[in-house]
Amino acid sequence: MTAPSTFGLIGLSSEARNLHWLLTNLVEEVPGILSVAVVSSDGLLLLSSDADRNKEAREARQTRAGRSAGPRGSAADLATIVSGIGSLTIGAAKLMDYGGVKHTMIAMEEGSLFVMSISDGSLLGVHGSADCDMSVVAYHMALFVGRAGHVLTPELRSELRKSLEESQTTGSAR
């Protein structure tokens, strides 16, 4: 396990730092989780697991044919997928008139994808390995949602977006 980096957390509110800590803890403590993204109701990435960890996971999971397994390049790819699946399932629920969507699990040959509602349209997306225990991942996602849902206010979402934009600008300048 790698220790979480605090470099990008300087200057953030305690709620934002706590959310980062919860996300880091989710990735590091739950076996089989490769990457995580928190997405706003309008599809924007708010928070993601450590980019270096994502890169290591992708490199470690090269298939025999030499192609990458999972989202190709970035947390933005996972956020796009999560947003699309969230939209599709919300539309399906409305057509079926069965109430709101709580979670979606997709099992593929070489991995899994989990999408869970957090609050007012925000979503938690998890990309898991093929051998992850889906019930354990879903349980820990529910814990994350329970802890994060009440603090994910419009102000915090705005702060997280700004922080992510600044870190991407700083990262591209290096």
Image: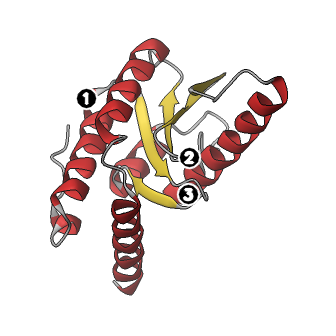
Mark 3 burial class by Cα count in 10 Å: few <14, some 14-19, many 20+: few
Q: Position of residue 149 (x, y in %)?
A: 37, 40
Q: How far is disc 3 from disc 1 in space, using C-alphas?
A: 23 Å
Amino acid on which disc 2 is placed: Gly
User: Which is in the foreground here, disc 3 or disc 1?
Assistant: 1
Mark 1 burial class by Cα count in 10 Å: few <14, some 14-19, many 20+: few
Q: Residue furthest right?
A: 95
- The foreground one among 147 and 2 is 147
Q: Secondary structure at mark 1?
A: helix
Q: Residue furthest bottom?
A: 173
Q: Position of residue 132 (x, y in %)?
A: 45, 19
Quadrant in which residue 106 is drawn? top right
User: Which is in the foreground here, disc 1 or disc 2?
Assistant: 2
- Give the number of the disc on residue 121: 2
> Is the N terminus in the top left, top right, bottom left or bottom right quadrant?
top left
User: Is residue 168 positioned above or below 132 on the image?
Assistant: below
Q: Which residue is tagged 3? A: 73
Amino acid on which disc 1 is placed: Glu
Q: How far is disc 1 from disc 2 in space, using C-alphas?
A: 26 Å
Q: Is residue 74 visible?
A: no
- The foreground one among 93 and 29 is 93
Q: Which residue is tagged 1? A: 29
> Is the C terminus in the top left, top right, bottom left or bottom right quadrant?
bottom left
User: Is residue 61 positioned above or below 174 on the image?
Assistant: above
